[in-house]
Image (cartoon, helix red, strand yellow):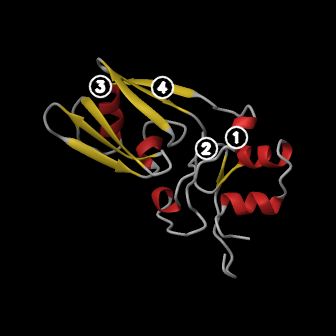
């Protein structure tokens, strides 16, 4: 990028959009810009769809084991990037305590596959549904595969798409 060697990242699949480096690795680099990724739709990739259910008590246990102090979780409030990926989660309990977890930890701490998901509460159960596998920063391996195999793009096209401004 501009004559310098890039520090790049790749992952399995993004489920529809990559993510800015600043939101994943605290890496503020212009070539790690999140964007919609239409290419994965052309192939049947691993973890195209996934879901998890956790009770408020389960979430309390997970968060307490990770060093956060919170009671039984009664609310989850995601912060979503311009790409549509979850970049932070605020958990709250009925006693007014809350915990904010940002970046990759907000989903890895819960055992979720990546940052492209929705969360819905139904009674005491929180349902997490998403698509993709990995951190979503940089190049999707399944997206690159689809670009080459399905659409006929070459490596330069793939680099230009996933690493904005890089060559």
Query: Reading the chain from its start, which is encountered first: label 3 or label 4?
Result: 4
Determine whether, in the image, residue 8 is placed left or right of residue 58: right
Report the quarter where the C terminus lies: bottom right
Mark 1 falls on what kind of element?
A: helix
Q: Is residue 109 left or right of residue 72?
A: right
Q: Residue at x 61, y 44 (%)?
A: 14
Sequence order check, earlier mark of 4 and 1: 1
Q: CA distance from mark 4 to mark 1?
A: 22 Å
Alpha-carbon neighbours of circle 1 within 10 Å: few (<14), some, or many (≥20)? Answer: many
In percent of width and height, residue 161 lies at 69, 58
User: Is there CB contact under 8 Å for labels 3 and 1?
Assistant: no
Asked if disc 1 and disc 2 are in contact, CB closer than 8 Å, the reply is yes
Residue pointed to by mark 1? 40
Q: Nearer the viewer, mark 2 or mark 3?
A: 2
Which one is in front in this view, the residue at disc 3 or the one at disc 1?
Answer: 1
Quickly name the residue at label 4. Answer: 52
Query: Relative to 18, is 69 above or below?
Result: above
Rendered image quadrant of residue 76: top left
Q: Residue 125 placed where, x, y %? A: 35, 20
Q: Answer few, some or many: residues within 10 Å of disc 2's Cα (few below 14, many 20 plus, some between 14 and 19).
A: many
Q: Which residue is mark 3?
A: 57
The single residue placed furthest to the bottom in the displayed view is 3
At a point 48% along the width and 45% down the height, the residue shown is 85
Q: Is residue 24 above or below residue 77?
A: below
């Amino acid at each position: 990028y501009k004559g310098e060697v890039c520090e790049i990242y790749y992952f399995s699949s993004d489920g529809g959009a990559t993510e800015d480096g600043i939101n994943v690795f605290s890496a503020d680099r212009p070539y790690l810009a999140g964007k919609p990724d239409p290419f994965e739709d052309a192939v049947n990739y691993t973890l195209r769809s996934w879901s998890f259910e956790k009770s408020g008590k389960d979430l309390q246990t997970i968060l307490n084991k990770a060093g956060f102090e919170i009671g039984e979780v009664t609310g989850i409030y995601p912060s979503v990037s311009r790409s549509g990926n979850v970049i932070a989660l605020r958990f709250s309990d009925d006693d007014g305590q809350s915990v904010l977890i940002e970046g990759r930890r907000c989903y890895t701490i819960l055992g979720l596959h990546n940052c492209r998901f929705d969360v819905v509460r139904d009674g005491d159960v929180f349902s997490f549904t998403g698509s993709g596998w990995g951190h979503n920063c940089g190049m999707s391996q399944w997206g690159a595969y689809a670009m080459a195999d399905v659409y006929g793009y070459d490596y330069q096209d793939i680099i230009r798409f996933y690493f904005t401004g890089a060559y």
